[in-house]
Amino acid sequence: MTFELTRLRGTAAELHERPLGAPVVRRATVLELDRPALVLGSTQRETDADELALDAFDVELCRRRSGGGAVLLVPGQTVWLDVEVGRDDPHWDDDVGRSFHWLGRTWAAALADLGVQGDVHTGGVLETPWSRKVCFGGLGPGEVTVAGRKLVGISQRRTRDGARFQCVVHRRWDPVPLLGLLSLHHRERAAALVDLADVGAGIDVEPDELVAALARHLA
């Protein structure tokens, strides 16, 4: 069984609202945005975002159905790729935490092709004071780190028919633009800039090169 590789382009809201209905088959989809988007996790409040800053920088605001903190998606600077498997797929696992591991290992193999040594987190969710606001502020099962810094973020949406794993990789980690779009007090933002400066990592390769490396290992 192989994964069908497809591409879709649109707004963040349109791409996040794609249904995950029966049948769910093996598919990897590269999502390409029309403009930057701040994506909130399913439990975040819209008031976590600074409406004036979003308008000033023409950044779309949307919400995903999977958990975690906010992610800033920037065309050409962020790879967003969804991977789907059905409940009858060998990769399916009823254990939600363990279900991420295979995909994390796949990402690590793809990164190795590009000369990057990645480590797959196989423990539980590691929360920090910032992880509920910023996705890369914490670490979840299956996510990949480089020298202790998160490079591949993965969240999951599950239905009775299958799962959609939403993966994000930045070409460069810089928390400043993201924090500038969140509704934070001045002291809180200053603390976040210090605490989040080194939590993430980037891989400065062309997005198509990264996607091609992953596609070689998806099986």
Image: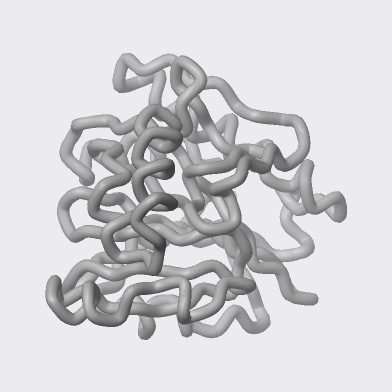
Please tell me whether residue 126 is drawn above or below residue 1 in the rendered image. Answer: above
The residue at the point 40 percent across, 19 percent down is: 112
Asked if residue 137 is positioned above or below residue 182 in the image, the reply reads: above
Quarter-wise, where is residue 73 in the image? bottom left
**Horizontal and vertical percent position of residue 34:** 17, 74
Q: Quadrant of residue 41?
A: bottom right
Q: Residue furthest front?
A: 187
Q: Residue at x 46, y 26 (%)?
A: 149
Q: Position of residue 101 (x, y in %)?
A: 68, 37
Q: Quadrant of the C terminus?
A: top right
State the residue in front, 129 or 187.
187
User: Residue at point 73% right, 75% down?
Assistant: 159
Is 177 on the left-hand or right-hand side of 83?
left
Residue 64 in sight:
yes
Outermost right residue: 94
Q: Does the rendering let one see residue 5? A: no
**Residue 35 lies in quadrant:** bottom left
Residue 139 % position (x, y): 60, 39
